[in-house]
Image (spheres, rainbow, N blue to C red):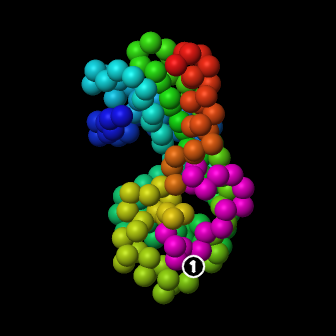
């Protein structure tokens, strides 16, 4: 097995979410763009690509641009429920077409006071995380209401396992 990170351009050049496009469709499209970017490097074999976004009140929460953006996101999530959706692309490249799926989880965040919010922002744990928070960050008061914990951290293992079984049935490998 070889891990090949997609070119930086795969995520940054993807068109924004289209009007009427569901969050699930959008993250699947982003995952497909990443897989295609890897495929374009000449890699052959099984490509797995994922993209995860949070959403609250219909507003997607990607990776924060900076500390102020992280603060804004965390304040929006404080004391509220939100959902996390991961798009998965599994592709036996180039022999078979890419398979796409989405996984959704619902989370609830306890209210954050100013002292905790400042501590969390100072910790830097928000960097590179959709919604400016990581479910795996042990002190963050997030509770999984429904769905998969592995989905929340960006690799929905149950979905990937099902997709691999379907790929195996299709390809006979």
Residue that numbered label 1 is attached to: 112
Q: Is residue 3 above or below residue 144?
A: above
Where does the magenta region start and end? 137-152
Asked if the magenta segment contains residue 160, the reply would be no
Q: Which residue: 45% across, 36% down?
A: 49
Q: Nearer the viewer, residue 9 or 170?
A: 170
Q: Nearer the viewer, residue 95 or 109?
A: 95
Q: Quick one: which residue is furthest to the bottom in this view?
A: 115
Q: Is residue 69 above or below residue 96?
A: below
In the picture, which quadrant includes the N terminus? top left
Q: Which residue: 61% across, 56% down?
A: 149
- Residue at disc 1, secondary structure: loop
Q: Position of residue 165 (x, y in %)?
A: 61, 28
Q: Is residue 61 visible?
A: no
Q: Which residue: 48% across, 42% down?
A: 51
Q: Is residue 17 above or below residue 115?
A: above
């Amino acid at each position: 097995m070889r891990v090949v990170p997609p070119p930086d351009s795969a995520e940054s050049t993807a068109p924004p979410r289209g009007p009427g496009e569901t969050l699930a469709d959008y993250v699947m499209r982003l995952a497909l763009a990443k897989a295609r970017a890897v495929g374009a490097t000449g890699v052959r074999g099984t490509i797995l690509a994922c993209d995860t976004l949070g959403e609250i009140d219909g507003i997607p929460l990607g990776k924060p641009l900076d500390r102020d953006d992280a603060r804004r996101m965390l304040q929006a999530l404080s004391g509220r429920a939100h959902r996390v959706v991961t798009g998965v692309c599994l592709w036996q490249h180039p022999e078979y077409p890419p398979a796409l799926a989405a996984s959704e989880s619902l989370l609830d965040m306890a209210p954050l006071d100013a002292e905790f919010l400042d501590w969390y922002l100072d910790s830097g744990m928000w960097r590179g995380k959709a919604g400016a928070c990581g479910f795996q960050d042990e002190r963050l008061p997030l509770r999984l209401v429904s769905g998969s914990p592995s989905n929340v951290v960006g690799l929905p293992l149950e979905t990937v396992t099902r997709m691999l079984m379907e790929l195996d049935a299709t390809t006979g490998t």
